[in-house]
Structures are given as C-alpha cells and as structure tokens.
Image (tube, rainbow, N blue to C red):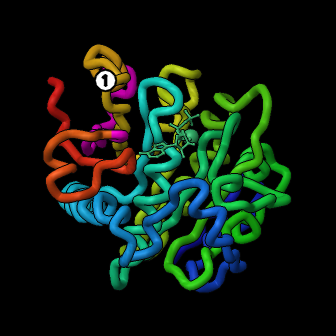
Amino acid sequence: MNATTLGNGASLHIPSVADLQVYQPEAETLENHFIVGFDSRDVRARPFNLVRTQVAKRLASRGARIVGITSATPDAGKSFFSLNLAASLSRVAEQTVYLVDLDLRRGSIATELGMTPKLGVSDFLDGTTDDLGSLGWRVDNSDLAVFPTRSIRGNSAELMASERFAQLVESFRSLPDNAIVLCDMPPAFANDDTMIAMQKLDGFFMVIDSGRTTKRQVRDTMEMLQPAPCFGAVMNRYKGALMDSYGYGYGYGSKMYDAYYN
Ligand SMILES: Nc1ncnc2c1ncn2[C@@H]1O[C@H](COP(=O)(O)OP(=O)(O)OP(=O)(O)O)[C@@H](O)[C@H]1O
Ligand SMILES: [Mg+2]
C-alpha cells in the first residue's frame, strides 16, 4: 500500500515511477550540468557507479531508504552528486529511485534538468496542492522519478516542521521495497531546514568539498544533525592518486568514505 491520509481526509499517494508524467531532458542540458550518471558508457559515470553500490549496501544493511544528502556549507556539490547518484542507482535492475528536492529556498534540481514545473514539493507543503502525483516526473527511459521544488522565500523551516512534511515522508516510506528516496538538502549551516527535516528521514550522506570543507565543519555537521545517522561521506572534486590511477579524476570525482571523523 502506498497511500497515507491527510488531516482533511484526502488520501496521499505516490505513484510508481511508471505512472508518472514523463520528462525528457535534453542531452545538452545534462552535459552542461555534468549529469553523466544516466550513461553507463560514459567514463565519467564510473565513480558514481562505484558509489552507488556502497550506498545501496549501506542503506540495505540499516533498513534505510529515505536519505538526505547534505554538506556543511554551500556549493559542495550536493545537487550534482544527488542527480548523478540517482541516475546511476536507477540503472540497477529492479531498483527505482525518487529524487526529491528539499532545498526549498534554493532548489536546483529542476534547473539542472532544464525543467520549469508549475508545481513543486513546496506547493504540497504549503497546501497549494494535495496531489503528490502532479509533482513527480519520470525521467524518460529511466527508473528515476524527480520531485522538483519551486524556490520559496521565508518560512521553509516551518514547512519542514509541518504535519504535511511528515505526511510527505510517510508517503515515500510506503513505496514498494525496491524504491530508494534521495533528498537533496540545503547546506546544514545555512538555516534550520536540514536539522528539522532530518528528524523524519532515515539518515544522511555528507558531501565534502575536497580541499575546502574542514574536519571541524564535518564534525559540527554530524553533531548538529544528531541523532540522525550519517551513512557515509562523499569526497567531491577529489583529485587524489587513487582516482587518477583509475582514470577518472578531472573534477568529476566522487569517492565514498566511511564516517571517519569520530
Ligand atoms: N565534481 C564536480 N565536477 C564538476 N562540476 C561540479 C562538481 N561538483 C559540483 N560541480 C558544479 O559546481 C556547482 C555547485 O554544485 P552544486 O549545485 O551541486 O552544489 P550544492 O552543494 O548543491 O550547492 P548549494 O549549497 O547551493 O545547494 C554546480 O555548477 C555543479 O555543476
Ligand atoms: Mg544544491
């Protein structure tokens, strides 16, 4: 059963990926935004394919399926990583992926895919619509569903703390077992949104901007988001020897680490 009920009695239902409206991103848009995870032949997709296996294993071993992707500070590459990981994961047989933009003030998933949706996650949270199906899009020829948001000003933390946010999460939670839900979050220190939302999610991955994010910022983020578990840290823009020796550095690198900073 993938339906929950709103306070007003309206039934909330997240359609399966196959039943969503279809969106076909332009190849040029994907290229311009470095979204390479859809193409298994693209050498730049390899780091994401390696990371996706780790992500799937870590989620499965913890019984987790709704996870946030955050960072300490802005511009670490959360949305870049979320999109590429989602695309790469969705290519695994029998796996469906829902990518939800929870950066309510500065959501970028729609723009990165070249979409201009009339409604987004924020419109559900503020009560503009009760129809979750109208918010989601299947990326053409894939098992990836995206739920973009339209950027709002103001009361995003209150929306995250609302009953409707809890209902939204519960609706995703009642998707079939083969669905993973990745939530692109704001930076943890930007506002309260991530801290509040994380209380409802199963845990998070942290994107570390190689050379810029400090150990202290990582530690403070982990502390701030407690008790939500950190499932791992991803080093973005990593150009270390390991990546280069396999031929995929060049600024596209992403590498998964355990939460090593205790
Ligand atoms: N490894 C990478 N290789 C190439 N470009 C990258 C990489 N990581 C991020 N970028 C680019 O850097 C910019 C910032 O990345 P992104 O928007 O994903 O960061 P973010 O952490 O989501 O930022 P915000 O905090 O504003 O949400 C984007 O233009 C993205 O395409
Ligand atoms: Mg972002």
Q: Residue at x 46, y 52 (%)?
A: 82
Which one is nearer the viewer's eye here, 34 or 174?
Answer: 34
| Residue 159 falls left or right of residue 143 | right
The percent position of residue 26, horizontal first and vertical second, equals 68, 71
What residue lies at 40% left-to-right and 59% top-to-bottom? 85
Res 63 seen here: no
Q: Which residues are magenta?
A: 223-237
**Magenta run includes residue 16:** no
Pinpoint residue 64: horizontal percent, then vertical percent.
31, 56
| Residue 119 placement, left or right of 25 | right
User: Whole-percent x and y of residue 170?
Assistant: 52, 57
* Number of numbered markers: 1
Regarding mark 1 in the picture, which secondary structure is present there?
helix
From the image, tell me which residue sits under label 1.
218
Q: Is residue 234 magenta?
A: yes
In this rendering, would 9 be left or right of 18?
right
Residue 235's place in the image compared with 180, above or below, is above
Mark 1 surroundings: few (<14), some (14-19) or many (≥20) residues within 10 A: many
Q: Quadrant of the C terminus?
A: top left
